[in-house]
Image (cartoon, rainbow, N blue to C red):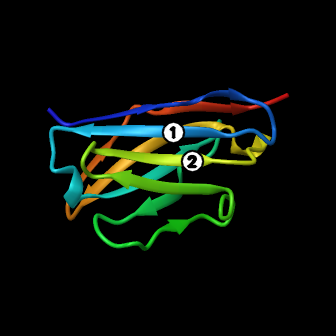
């Protein structure tokens, strides 16, 4: 059974940090490109960051570039999203995504709320 389980969300003050984790199981994690998306209330789900199955290349949305860092551990089958200098506009449900050719899996999401 394929599972992507996110954790690490919560309430944080502006300027604070959080690290999201997404644990994958039931598929060959190392073969999949991994991505983080987010969806704010009333808005579309948008790509935040991506990391390929192999190689050092990463991509980030302009909104998070310089503040967020995506990384992965193919031994533990976990992808991380380190989020620094969080702002209220970062408030959203964050979703983990795994993609390999026609195969695509989603996690259930974790809420991140940035508020004073």
Which picture quadrant has residue 18? top right
Left or right? Give the position of 18 relative to 53.
Answer: right
Left or right? Give the position of 63 relative to 108.
Answer: right
Seen at 22% across and 56% down, the residue is 30
* Location of residue 101 in the rendering, given as x and y in whole percent from the top left corner: 21, 65
Question: Looking at this view, is 38 or 52 the one in front?
Answer: 52
* Location of residue 54 in the rendering, given as x and y in whole percent from the top left corner: 29, 68
Query: Is residue 16 at all visible to an observer of this figure?
Result: yes
Q: CA distance from mark 2 to mark 1?
A: 6 Å
Q: Residues within 10 Å of mark 1 (few under 14, many from 20)?
A: many
Outermost residue, front side: 75
What secondary structure is marked by label 2? Answer: strand
Which picture quadrant has residue 3? top left
What secondary structure is marked by label 1? Answer: strand
* Location of residue 37 in the rendering, given as x and y in whole percent from the top left corner: 50, 49
Which numbered disc covers residue 20? 1
Query: Which residue is denoted by mark 2 in the rendering?
Result: 82
Seen at 15% across and 38% down, the residue is 26
Question: Looking at this view, is 41 or 95 the one in front?
Answer: 95
Left or right? Give the position of 71 relative to 52.
Answer: right
Left or right? Give the position of 2 relative to 98.
Answer: left
Which picture quadrant has residue 48? bottom right
Seen at 42% across and 33% down, the residue is 6
Mark before the other along the chain sequence, 2 or 1: 1
Q: Residues within 10 Å of mark 2 (few under 14, many from 20)?
A: some
* Location of residue 33 in the rendering, given as x and y in whole percent from the top left corner: 31, 61
Query: Is residue 103 at all visible to an observer of this figure?
Result: no
Q: Height in image: 70 above or below 56?
A: above
Of the 4 image quadrants, the one containing the N terminus is: top left
The reply to whether callout 2 and callout 1 are in contact (CB within 8 Å) is: no
Which numbered disc covers residue 43? none
């Amino acid at each position: 059974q394929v599972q992507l389980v996110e954790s690490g969300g919560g309430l944080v003050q502006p300027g604070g940090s959080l690290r999201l984790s997404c644990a994958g199981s039931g598929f060959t994690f190392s073969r999949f490109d991994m991505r983080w998306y987010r969806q704010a209330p009333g808005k579309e789900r948008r790509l935040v960051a991506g990391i390929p199955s192999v190689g050092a290349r990463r991509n980030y949305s302009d909104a998070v570039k310089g503040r967020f860092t995506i990384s992965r551990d193919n031994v533990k089958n976990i992808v991380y999203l380190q989020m620094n200098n969080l702002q209220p506009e970062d408030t959203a449900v964050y979703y983990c995504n795994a993609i390999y050719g026609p195969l695509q899996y989603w996690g259930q999401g974790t809420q991140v709320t940035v508020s004073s």
